[in-house]
Image (spheres, grey):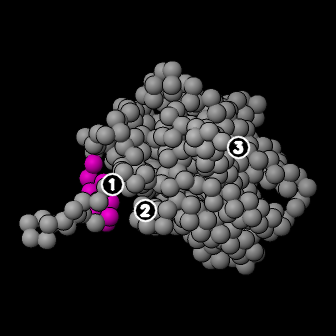
Amino acid sequence: MSSATAVATPVRAATRGVYAAFILMGFAGASWAARIPQVRDELSLTPSGLGLVLLAIAAGSIVSLLLAGQIVAHFGSRRTVTAMAALLGVSLSATAIGYQFGVAPVVIALFCYGFANGGWDVAMNVQGTVVERHLGRAIMPRFHAGYSIGTVAGALLGAAAVALHVSVTVHLMISAILVAIIVMPAVQAFMADEPEDLEPPVPIDPVHAAPPASRVARALATWREPRTVLIGLFVLAFAFTEGAGLDWISIAMIDGYGVPATVGTLAFATFLAAMTIGRWFGPGWLDRYGRVPVVRALAAVSLAGLALFVFGSVPALAFLGVLLWGLGASLGFPVGMSAAADDPAHAAPRVSVVATIGYCAFLGGPPLVGFLGDHVTVLKALLAVVALLFLAVTLAESVKPLRPTGQAS
Protein backbone atom coordinates (compact mmCIF):
# COMPACT_ATOMS: atom_id res chain seq x y z
CA MET A 1 0.00 0.00 0.00
CA SER A 2 1.39 3.41 -0.96
CA SER A 3 1.96 6.07 1.67
CA ALA A 4 -0.67 8.31 0.03
CA THR A 5 -3.25 5.52 0.28
CA ALA A 6 -2.28 4.83 3.88
CA VAL A 7 -2.90 8.48 4.75
CA ALA A 8 -6.12 8.72 2.73
CA THR A 9 -7.73 5.64 4.28
CA PRO A 10 -8.11 7.07 7.82
CA VAL A 11 -9.41 10.32 6.36
CA ARG A 12 -12.07 8.47 4.37
CA ALA A 13 -13.03 6.45 7.42
CA ALA A 14 -13.25 9.59 9.56
CA THR A 15 -15.32 11.27 6.84
CA ARG A 16 -17.81 8.40 6.93
CA GLY A 17 -17.90 8.61 10.71
CA VAL A 18 -18.64 12.34 10.64
CA TYR A 19 -21.41 11.80 8.10
CA ALA A 20 -22.92 9.14 10.35
CA ALA A 21 -22.81 11.48 13.35
CA PHE A 22 -24.52 14.29 11.44
CA ILE A 23 -27.13 12.04 9.78
CA LEU A 24 -28.17 10.24 12.96
CA MET A 25 -28.35 13.46 14.97
CA GLY A 26 -30.66 14.92 12.33
CA PHE A 27 -32.75 11.75 12.25
CA ALA A 28 -33.27 11.85 16.02
CA GLY A 29 -34.22 15.54 16.03
CA ALA A 30 -36.72 15.21 13.19
CA SER A 31 -38.25 12.08 14.70
CA TRP A 32 -39.08 14.09 17.81
CA ALA A 33 -40.16 17.21 15.91
CA ALA A 34 -42.49 15.22 13.65
CA ARG A 35 -44.51 14.15 16.69
CA ILE A 36 -44.71 17.53 18.42
CA PRO A 37 -48.36 18.11 17.32
CA GLN A 38 -49.46 14.79 18.86
CA VAL A 39 -47.55 15.44 22.10
CA ARG A 40 -49.09 18.92 22.24
CA ASP A 41 -52.59 17.49 21.87
CA GLU A 42 -51.98 14.75 24.45
CA LEU A 43 -50.76 17.31 26.99
CA SER A 44 -53.40 19.93 25.98
CA LEU A 45 -50.78 22.66 25.58
CA THR A 46 -51.37 26.20 24.32
CA PRO A 47 -48.78 27.70 21.93
CA SER A 48 -47.05 29.45 24.84
CA GLY A 49 -47.16 26.27 26.93
CA LEU A 50 -45.64 24.29 24.09
CA GLY A 51 -42.98 26.97 23.69
CA LEU A 52 -41.99 26.58 27.33
CA VAL A 53 -41.80 22.79 27.02
CA LEU A 54 -39.58 23.13 23.95
CA LEU A 55 -37.44 25.54 25.97
CA ALA A 56 -36.20 22.54 27.97
CA ILE A 57 -34.24 21.30 24.95
CA ALA A 58 -32.54 24.65 24.50
CA ALA A 59 -31.79 24.94 28.22
CA GLY A 60 -30.09 21.54 28.23
CA SER A 61 -28.15 22.45 25.10
CA ILE A 62 -26.90 25.72 26.55
CA VAL A 63 -25.68 24.01 29.73
CA SER A 64 -23.91 21.41 27.63
CA LEU A 65 -22.41 23.93 25.23
CA LEU A 66 -20.92 25.96 28.07
CA LEU A 67 -18.97 22.84 29.02
CA ALA A 68 -18.49 21.32 25.59
CA GLY A 69 -15.23 23.04 24.70
CA GLN A 70 -13.56 21.64 27.81
CA ILE A 71 -15.23 18.24 27.44
CA VAL A 72 -14.08 17.84 23.84
CA ALA A 73 -10.60 19.17 24.61
CA HIS A 74 -10.22 16.68 27.47
CA PHE A 75 -11.95 13.56 26.14
CA GLY A 76 -11.76 14.13 22.37
CA SER A 77 -14.57 14.29 19.85
CA ARG A 78 -14.82 10.51 19.42
CA ARG A 79 -15.50 9.71 23.07
CA THR A 80 -17.71 12.77 23.46
CA VAL A 81 -20.00 11.80 20.57
CA THR A 82 -20.13 8.19 21.81
CA ALA A 83 -21.25 9.23 25.29
CA MET A 84 -23.69 11.86 24.07
CA ALA A 85 -25.27 9.45 21.57
CA ALA A 86 -25.95 7.02 24.42
CA LEU A 87 -27.49 9.79 26.54
CA LEU A 88 -29.57 11.04 23.62
CA GLY A 89 -30.97 7.56 23.00
CA VAL A 90 -31.94 7.20 26.67
CA SER A 91 -33.53 10.67 26.85
CA LEU A 92 -35.51 10.20 23.62
CA SER A 93 -36.81 6.91 24.98
CA ALA A 94 -37.77 8.66 28.23
CA THR A 95 -39.66 11.30 26.24
CA ALA A 96 -41.49 8.55 24.35
CA ILE A 97 -42.78 7.09 27.60
CA GLY A 98 -42.98 10.21 29.78
CA TYR A 99 -45.45 12.21 27.68
CA GLN A 100 -48.17 9.74 28.77
CA PHE A 101 -47.72 10.81 32.39
CA GLY A 102 -47.68 14.60 32.11
CA VAL A 103 -45.55 17.63 31.36
CA ALA A 104 -42.86 17.21 34.05
CA PRO A 105 -41.38 13.92 32.75
CA VAL A 106 -41.26 15.36 29.23
CA VAL A 107 -39.47 18.52 30.38
CA ILE A 108 -36.84 16.50 32.29
CA ALA A 109 -36.29 14.11 29.39
CA LEU A 110 -36.06 16.94 26.86
CA PHE A 111 -33.53 18.78 29.03
CA CYS A 112 -31.33 15.67 28.97
CA TYR A 113 -31.94 15.36 25.24
CA GLY A 114 -30.78 18.95 24.78
CA PHE A 115 -27.68 18.35 26.91
CA ALA A 116 -26.73 15.36 24.75
CA ASN A 117 -27.51 17.27 21.58
CA GLY A 118 -25.27 20.21 22.51
CA GLY A 119 -22.19 18.18 23.38
CA TRP A 120 -22.64 15.95 20.35
CA ASP A 121 -23.02 19.00 18.09
CA VAL A 122 -19.76 20.66 19.15
CA ALA A 123 -17.79 17.40 19.04
CA MET A 124 -18.90 16.39 15.55
CA ASN A 125 -18.31 19.91 14.22
CA VAL A 126 -14.79 19.89 15.64
CA GLN A 127 -14.12 16.54 13.98
CA GLY A 128 -15.68 17.88 10.77
CA THR A 129 -13.17 20.72 10.68
CA VAL A 130 -10.33 18.22 11.22
CA VAL A 131 -11.49 16.23 8.20
CA GLU A 132 -11.99 19.44 6.20
CA ARG A 133 -8.38 20.49 6.85
CA HIS A 134 -7.03 17.08 5.85
CA LEU A 135 -9.04 17.13 2.62
CA GLY A 136 -7.98 20.70 1.83
CA ARG A 137 -11.40 21.74 0.55
CA ALA A 138 -14.80 22.87 1.83
CA ILE A 139 -16.88 19.93 3.01
CA MET A 140 -18.51 21.22 6.19
CA PRO A 141 -21.76 22.22 4.41
CA ARG A 142 -22.01 18.67 3.08
CA PHE A 143 -21.67 17.29 6.58
CA HIS A 144 -24.55 19.55 7.52
CA ALA A 145 -26.32 18.28 4.41
CA GLY A 146 -25.92 14.86 5.99
CA TYR A 147 -27.67 16.23 9.06
CA SER A 148 -30.45 17.49 6.81
CA ILE A 149 -30.70 14.13 5.03
CA GLY A 150 -31.18 12.58 8.44
CA THR A 151 -33.89 15.11 9.27
CA VAL A 152 -35.71 14.38 6.00
CA ALA A 153 -35.58 10.65 6.72
CA GLY A 154 -36.83 11.26 10.25
CA ALA A 155 -39.62 13.56 9.07
CA LEU A 156 -40.79 11.15 6.35
CA LEU A 157 -40.76 8.28 8.81
CA GLY A 158 -42.72 10.51 11.18
CA ALA A 159 -45.28 11.32 8.48
CA ALA A 160 -45.68 7.62 7.77
CA ALA A 161 -46.06 6.90 11.48
CA VAL A 162 -48.78 9.57 11.78
CA ALA A 163 -50.60 8.29 8.69
CA LEU A 164 -50.46 4.69 9.95
CA HIS A 165 -51.51 5.72 13.48
CA VAL A 166 -48.31 4.40 15.05
CA SER A 167 -48.11 5.63 18.63
CA VAL A 168 -45.60 8.29 19.62
CA THR A 169 -44.11 5.86 22.13
CA VAL A 170 -43.39 3.09 19.61
CA HIS A 171 -42.11 5.52 16.97
CA LEU A 172 -39.67 7.37 19.24
CA MET A 173 -38.44 4.21 20.99
CA ILE A 174 -37.51 2.65 17.64
CA SER A 175 -35.80 5.88 16.56
CA ALA A 176 -33.78 6.04 19.79
CA ILE A 177 -32.55 2.47 19.40
CA LEU A 178 -31.55 3.03 15.77
CA VAL A 179 -29.55 6.14 16.67
CA ALA A 180 -27.61 4.43 19.45
CA ILE A 181 -26.74 1.21 17.64
CA ILE A 182 -25.63 2.94 14.42
CA VAL A 183 -23.75 6.05 15.48
CA MET A 184 -21.77 4.71 18.43
CA PRO A 185 -19.66 2.23 16.42
CA ALA A 186 -19.47 4.54 13.38
CA VAL A 187 -17.65 7.35 15.20
CA GLN A 188 -14.83 5.10 16.38
CA ALA A 189 -13.08 6.03 13.11
CA PHE A 190 -12.71 9.70 14.14
CA MET A 191 -9.20 11.16 13.79
CA ALA A 192 -7.23 12.97 16.49
CA ASP A 193 -8.76 16.41 17.04
CA GLU A 194 -5.47 18.35 17.13
CA PRO A 195 -2.20 17.42 15.43
CA GLU A 196 0.62 17.23 17.95
CA ASP A 197 2.35 20.26 16.47
CA LEU A 198 -0.56 22.66 16.95
CA GLU A 199 0.26 23.46 20.56
CA PRO A 200 3.83 22.34 21.24
CA PRO A 201 4.92 22.05 24.86
CA VAL A 202 6.18 25.32 26.30
CA PRO A 203 9.29 24.96 28.48
CA ILE A 204 8.87 26.60 31.86
CA ASP A 205 11.65 28.38 33.69
CA PRO A 206 10.66 27.76 37.33
CA VAL A 207 12.27 31.01 38.39
CA HIS A 208 11.56 33.55 35.67
CA ALA A 209 8.58 32.21 33.72
CA ALA A 210 4.92 31.83 34.63
CA PRO A 211 3.20 28.56 33.69
CA PRO A 212 1.23 28.54 30.44
CA ALA A 213 -2.43 29.49 30.55
CA SER A 214 -4.78 26.70 31.53
CA ARG A 215 -7.44 25.38 29.17
CA VAL A 216 -10.10 27.18 31.22
CA ALA A 217 -8.30 30.52 30.89
CA ARG A 218 -7.94 30.05 27.13
CA ALA A 219 -11.62 29.16 26.86
CA LEU A 220 -12.63 32.30 28.79
CA ALA A 221 -10.35 34.41 26.61
CA THR A 222 -12.19 33.13 23.54
CA TRP A 223 -15.35 34.84 24.74
CA ARG A 224 -13.52 38.19 24.48
CA GLU A 225 -12.63 37.80 20.80
CA PRO A 226 -14.81 40.21 18.78
CA ARG A 227 -14.73 38.13 15.60
CA THR A 228 -15.77 34.97 17.46
CA VAL A 229 -18.67 36.74 19.19
CA LEU A 230 -19.88 38.29 15.93
CA ILE A 231 -19.79 34.91 14.22
CA GLY A 232 -21.82 33.58 17.15
CA LEU A 233 -24.47 36.27 16.63
CA PHE A 234 -24.50 35.50 12.91
CA VAL A 235 -25.09 31.82 13.69
CA LEU A 236 -27.77 32.79 16.23
CA ALA A 237 -29.71 34.62 13.52
CA PHE A 238 -29.64 31.67 11.14
CA ALA A 239 -30.26 29.20 13.98
CA PHE A 240 -33.41 31.12 14.92
CA THR A 241 -34.51 31.01 11.27
CA GLU A 242 -33.86 27.26 11.08
CA GLY A 243 -35.23 26.46 14.54
CA ALA A 244 -38.50 28.32 13.98
CA GLY A 245 -39.10 26.13 10.96
CA LEU A 246 -38.19 22.93 12.78
CA ASP A 247 -40.44 23.64 15.77
CA TRP A 248 -43.42 25.41 14.26
CA ILE A 249 -44.01 24.63 10.57
CA SER A 250 -46.19 21.59 11.29
CA ILE A 251 -48.21 23.47 13.91
CA ALA A 252 -48.59 26.54 11.67
CA MET A 253 -49.78 24.41 8.73
CA ILE A 254 -52.28 22.46 10.85
CA ASP A 255 -53.66 25.47 12.75
CA GLY A 256 -53.17 28.21 10.14
CA TYR A 257 -54.14 26.37 6.95
CA GLY A 258 -56.45 23.74 8.42
CA VAL A 259 -54.61 20.80 6.84
CA PRO A 260 -54.47 17.26 8.32
CA ALA A 261 -51.56 16.33 10.58
CA THR A 262 -49.95 14.22 7.85
CA VAL A 263 -49.86 17.20 5.47
CA GLY A 264 -48.39 19.38 8.19
CA THR A 265 -45.61 16.84 8.72
CA LEU A 266 -44.99 16.71 4.96
CA ALA A 267 -44.58 20.51 4.92
CA PHE A 268 -41.99 20.07 7.68
CA ALA A 269 -40.26 17.42 5.53
CA THR A 270 -40.28 19.82 2.55
CA PHE A 271 -38.49 22.44 4.65
CA LEU A 272 -35.87 19.88 5.62
CA ALA A 273 -35.46 18.66 2.03
CA ALA A 274 -34.81 22.25 0.90
CA MET A 275 -32.15 22.64 3.58
CA THR A 276 -30.56 19.40 2.40
CA ILE A 277 -30.37 20.67 -1.19
CA GLY A 278 -28.79 23.94 -0.05
CA ARG A 279 -26.20 22.20 2.08
CA TRP A 280 -25.32 19.63 -0.55
CA PHE A 281 -24.70 22.17 -3.32
CA GLY A 282 -23.45 24.84 -0.92
CA PRO A 283 -19.72 23.98 -1.10
CA GLY A 284 -19.69 24.74 -4.83
CA TRP A 285 -21.39 28.08 -4.28
CA LEU A 286 -19.00 28.95 -1.46
CA ASP A 287 -15.90 28.01 -3.43
CA ARG A 288 -17.07 30.00 -6.44
CA TYR A 289 -18.56 33.13 -4.88
CA GLY A 290 -17.26 33.22 -1.29
CA ARG A 291 -18.97 33.02 2.07
CA VAL A 292 -20.29 36.56 2.41
CA PRO A 293 -22.15 36.96 -0.94
CA VAL A 294 -23.66 33.47 -0.66
CA VAL A 295 -25.07 33.83 2.85
CA ARG A 296 -26.49 37.28 2.04
CA ALA A 297 -28.22 35.96 -1.08
CA LEU A 298 -29.64 33.02 0.83
CA ALA A 299 -30.96 35.29 3.56
CA ALA A 300 -32.96 37.12 0.87
CA VAL A 301 -34.30 33.80 -0.44
CA SER A 302 -35.37 32.83 3.07
CA LEU A 303 -37.17 36.16 3.52
CA ALA A 304 -39.11 35.59 0.30
CA GLY A 305 -40.06 32.10 1.39
CA LEU A 306 -41.18 33.24 4.82
CA ALA A 307 -43.44 35.88 3.24
CA LEU A 308 -45.04 33.25 1.00
CA PHE A 309 -45.55 30.89 3.89
CA VAL A 310 -47.23 33.46 6.14
CA PHE A 311 -49.27 35.32 3.52
CA GLY A 312 -49.72 32.64 0.85
CA SER A 313 -53.38 31.98 1.84
CA VAL A 314 -53.44 28.49 0.24
CA PRO A 315 -51.44 25.36 1.14
CA ALA A 316 -49.73 25.16 -2.28
CA LEU A 317 -48.11 28.59 -1.80
CA ALA A 318 -47.25 27.69 1.77
CA PHE A 319 -45.35 24.64 0.50
CA LEU A 320 -43.45 26.83 -1.97
CA GLY A 321 -42.72 29.21 0.90
CA VAL A 322 -41.24 26.50 3.14
CA LEU A 323 -39.13 25.32 0.20
CA LEU A 324 -37.54 28.78 -0.23
CA TRP A 325 -37.36 29.34 3.52
CA GLY A 326 -35.44 26.09 4.03
CA LEU A 327 -33.12 26.70 1.08
CA GLY A 328 -32.26 30.17 2.37
CA ALA A 329 -31.63 28.96 5.93
CA SER A 330 -29.40 26.08 4.84
CA LEU A 331 -25.84 27.44 4.99
CA GLY A 332 -25.81 29.89 7.90
CA PHE A 333 -24.97 27.38 10.62
CA PRO A 334 -22.31 25.37 8.72
CA VAL A 335 -20.61 28.50 7.38
CA GLY A 336 -20.47 29.90 10.90
CA MET A 337 -18.90 26.67 12.21
CA SER A 338 -16.27 26.73 9.45
CA ALA A 339 -15.51 30.39 10.15
CA ALA A 340 -15.11 29.68 13.87
CA ALA A 341 -12.62 26.89 13.08
CA ASP A 342 -10.52 28.80 10.51
CA ASP A 343 -7.56 28.69 12.89
CA PRO A 344 -7.12 25.00 13.79
CA ALA A 345 -5.14 25.77 16.95
CA HIS A 346 -8.24 27.41 18.47
CA ALA A 347 -10.99 25.41 16.76
CA ALA A 348 -12.50 23.64 19.79
CA PRO A 349 -13.02 26.67 22.08
CA ARG A 350 -14.18 28.93 19.24
CA VAL A 351 -16.64 26.37 17.88
CA SER A 352 -17.93 25.93 21.43
CA VAL A 353 -18.43 29.70 21.90
CA VAL A 354 -20.10 30.14 18.52
CA ALA A 355 -22.37 27.14 19.08
CA THR A 356 -23.29 28.39 22.56
CA ILE A 357 -24.30 31.81 21.24
CA GLY A 358 -26.10 30.22 18.30
CA TYR A 359 -28.06 27.88 20.54
CA CYS A 360 -29.44 30.87 22.44
CA ALA A 361 -31.80 31.12 19.45
CA PHE A 362 -33.27 27.79 20.51
CA LEU A 363 -33.46 29.09 24.08
CA GLY A 364 -35.43 32.22 23.20
CA GLY A 365 -37.10 31.13 19.96
CA PRO A 366 -39.72 28.61 21.14
CA PRO A 367 -41.18 30.74 23.95
CA LEU A 368 -41.09 33.90 21.81
CA VAL A 369 -43.00 32.32 18.93
CA GLY A 370 -45.29 30.55 21.39
CA PHE A 371 -46.23 33.71 23.32
CA LEU A 372 -46.75 35.66 20.10
CA GLY A 373 -48.81 32.76 18.80
CA ASP A 374 -51.23 33.11 21.73
CA HIS A 375 -52.04 36.61 20.47
CA VAL A 376 -51.62 36.65 16.68
CA THR A 377 -51.60 32.90 15.75
CA VAL A 378 -48.47 30.82 15.30
CA LEU A 379 -48.48 31.50 11.54
CA LYS A 380 -48.20 35.27 11.97
CA ALA A 381 -45.82 34.91 14.93
CA LEU A 382 -43.23 33.44 12.55
CA LEU A 383 -42.71 36.95 11.15
CA ALA A 384 -40.37 37.42 14.11
CA VAL A 385 -37.82 35.55 11.97
CA VAL A 386 -37.59 38.58 9.65
CA ALA A 387 -35.68 40.66 12.20
CA LEU A 388 -33.13 37.88 12.69
CA LEU A 389 -32.55 37.52 8.96
CA PHE A 390 -31.74 41.22 8.69
CA LEU A 391 -29.27 40.74 11.57
CA ALA A 392 -27.66 37.89 9.62
CA VAL A 393 -27.18 40.11 6.56
CA THR A 394 -25.61 42.83 8.73
CA LEU A 395 -23.15 40.43 10.37
CA ALA A 396 -22.21 38.47 7.24
CA GLU A 397 -18.78 40.16 6.98
CA SER A 398 -17.72 38.40 10.19
CA VAL A 399 -17.50 35.02 8.43
CA LYS A 400 -14.79 36.07 5.99
CA PRO A 401 -12.04 33.42 6.01
CA LEU A 402 -9.29 33.81 8.59
CA ARG A 403 -5.77 32.57 7.83
CA PRO A 404 -5.00 29.46 9.90
CA THR A 405 -2.06 31.20 11.58
CA GLY A 406 -4.01 34.38 12.30
CA GLN A 407 -5.70 35.50 15.44
CA ALA A 408 -9.23 36.80 15.92
CA SER A 409 -9.27 40.53 15.42
Measured along the vertical axis of the image, is residue 66 above or below residue 155? below
Q: In the image, which disc is placed on residue 48?
A: none
- Across and down, in percent, residue 17 comes to 64, 52
Q: Secondary structure at mark 2?
A: helix
In front: label 1 or label 3:
1
| Quadrant containing the C terminus in the rendered view | top left
Instruction: State the residue position of label 3.
Output: 149
The single residue placed furthest to the top in the displayed view is: 288
| Front residue of 397 and 328 | 397
Amino acid type, callout 1: Glu
| Front residue of 103 and 295 | 295
Measured along the vertical axis of the image, is residue 378 above or below residue 302? below
Q: Secondary structure at mark 1?
A: loop
Tag 1 near tag 3, CB within 8 Å? no
224 in magenta? yes
How much space separates mark 1 and mark 2, taking CA atoms?
Answer: 12 Å
- Across and down, in percent, residue 311 comes to 63, 32
Amino acid type, callout 3: Ile
